[in-house]
Image (cartoon, coloured by chain):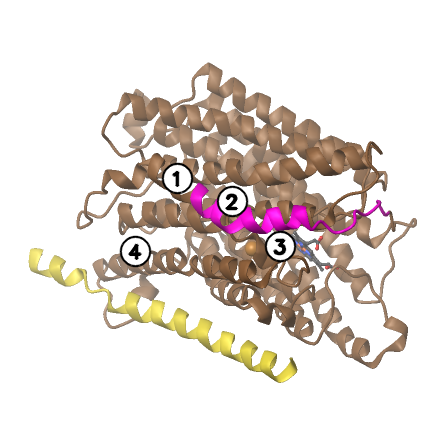
Amino acid sequence: MTTIKEKALGFTIVDRRDGKLALANMYVAFIALFIGGLCGLLQVLVRSGKFTLPWGIGYYQVLTVHGVLLGLILTTYFILGFQIAAMSRTSGTFTDKQRLLGWIGFWVMTIGTVAAATMVLLNEASVLYTFYAPLQAHWIFYVGMALVVVGSWIVGIALFMKYIEWRKANPGQPSPLLSFMVVVNMAMWQICTLGVAVEVVFQLIPWSLGWVDKVDVLLSRTLFWYFGHPLVYFWLLPAYMVWYVVIPKIIGGKIFSDALARLSFMLFLLFSIPVGFHHQLTEPGIQSFWKFLQVVLTMMVVIPSLLTAFSMFASFELRGRQLGAKGLFGWFKKLPWNDARFTVPFIGMAAFVPAGAGGIINASHQMNQLIHNTIWVTGHFHLTVATTVVLTFFGASYWLLPHLTGRVLTKQMNKLAIIQGIVWAVGMTIMSAAMHIVGLMGAPRRSDFSTYGGAAQATDWIPYQIAQAVGGTILFVGIILILYIVVNLLFFAPKGETEFPIGEVSEHAEKSPMWLENWKIWLTICIALILFAYTVPVIEMIQNAPPGSKGYKFW
Amino acid sequence: MSKKKEKDSDLKGTLYSVGLVGIFILVTWFMAFYLFIDRF
Ligand code: HEM
Ligand SMILES: [Cu+2]
């Protein structure tokens, strides 16, 4: 149902009521970015050895705030807000009931977030964002985390309902691409969060309440990583949504292929879940064969990843050639480099090349020993999530926020946004490169400043920690810039209408076959793969369970 | 125009770009592999 205003503008506007719900999620996301970013700054300063935290605040408390707020809260809220807007934009306005579910989910998540955050601030839960047993937090922290997950399920139900409604109203037709992608991501989330929910509800909560005194650490980690790897794809897929669907429109081109986009999303669904062991490659108690099997499944994501790279390059090249580009790479110069909505996510795409290469190294079974628990890993995921994903999210905010608030991104803000992207790239290159290199020299992750009793090896690490402090400080400037732009877009930018860009499929592309949207097939394969990869090792784990551990509080 | 359109679907640059990404991945992987063999 297009309104007269929309006809005049030539684009669809997300219903204001849905927009409010999406915006509520965005507010929480950006508040989390501010506090979490501040903690990041404190961490690099402490680790440089030149600064100590005041008022007896512990390093690991700060690191818990950073990991939880940025890794879990910023991401989940931004993604749900983005997906709510995307669904409303492409499948139509939510019904009152669906929107109510969206709000209930939001508040359940927010109560959980506040509960967990309070415990961390009271220094009752400095267990880092992975809340690994046998570190033991206050039970309220775990209940808060569980509420965040349950709240996200409720939002997920609203999204599923919208999708089902669309399919019923349009029988025999493929759903809008963006809606389809949202549903794939939420299906993956639904399946993987069951693992962490079981861990928290059946292991950690009873144990932290003292109902049982021991916890099976091996099983708890396995359940965590059954969730933990899909978690990183839950962050990444919304960025891919922007790349596949929005970026082609922004550059004035077309989506290279609808079918290819759908296929790669389904492959991500299949190969993101049965692979958690690649985080447990040094874990005793899991047979090497099962690790190897999950390593093979992990490597399968190379396929949809390269499909994505191909599809992006193809959209760019086709557009560039349309504009008259010559030669092998002439199209590169024709891209709209002065448009922050393109350039900022593009920096994110570029970061994914070293990020992906590093990921393959991490997952290469025995080779994992090279980097396991070193700060290389931190360098790696600051490229994946803290660059590729967040820069794409920032780039998306530059049209999504003004779209939802009925404002426009001014020329000055656009320029500042590009500067923001460059500042981020510079800061991250310095910080992440230093982390990668010193990680290979054995420097551990998750560690306060220490001279390790004057050990020579640890002395060699210090210059790299200073480099991280330099890079991290530049990154913090990047955080101030993005927050300045966001506040502008929310409250001060001039009124006007901004488009929510949705690309059209190239006229040369084949029509997508319906089997790509046959959930029976895909979910069956997905569950079969999970059962294949996990059933036997988990049974072995339970039958030969290690002795349970009591809880520890080291902070 | 339509003749031109046909030529548009020339995706050589894309092929080379994806190839370069692939080569980058292989090179870094072998560097890490070498380090691994050297150490363990
Ligand atoms: C100002 C920007 C940032 C700086 C300076 C920074 C710095 C750091 C440092 C130094 C660590 C590791 C500390 C250690 O292992 O002892 C760390 C960990 C981490 N960072 Fe960041 N970071 C920044 C932004 C981000 C962003 C935007 C995200 C996510 C979207 C993020 C997610 C994480 C996560 C999940 C951890 C792991 C925490 C853990 O190991 O428990 N960071 N960060
Ligand atoms: Cu993983």
Residue B24 drawn at (x, y percent): 44, 73
Question: Label 4 to label 2, Cα distance in Å?
Answer: 24 Å
Whether pointer 4 and pointer 1 mark residues with C-beta atoms closer than 8 Å, the reply is no
Farthest residue to the bottom: give it.
B38
Residue A203 on the magenta span: no
Q: Which mark is residue A234?
A: 2
Question: Label 1 to label 2, Cα distance in Å?
Answer: 20 Å
* Label 3 near ligand 1 (CB < 8 Å): yes
Residue A166 drawn at (x, y percent): 33, 25
Q: Which mark is residue A524?
A: 1
- Sequence-wise, the earlier of marks 2 and 3 is 2
Circle nearer the viewer, 1 or 2? 1
Q: Identify the residue at horizontal 56%, vertical 82% (top origin).
A: B34
| Element under disc 4 | helix
The subunit carrying tag 3 is A
For label 4, the residue is A315
Circle nearer the viewer, 2 or 3? 2
Q: Residues within 10 Å of mark 1 (few under 14, many from 20)?
A: few
Name which quarter of the figure residue A306 lies in: bottom left
In the image, which lettered chain appears brown? Answer: A
In the image, which lettered chain appears yellow? Answer: B
Q: Identify the residue at horizontal 75%, vertical 61% (top origin).
A: A44
- Sequence-wise, the earlier of marks 1 and 2 is 2
The subunit carrying tag 2 is A
Circle nearer the viewer, 4 or 2? 2
| Element under disc 1 | helix
Question: Label 4 to label 1, Cα distance in Å?
Answer: 32 Å
Query: Which amino acid type is marked by label 1?
Result: Thr
The subunit carrying tag 4 is A
Q: Which mark is residue A478?
A: 3
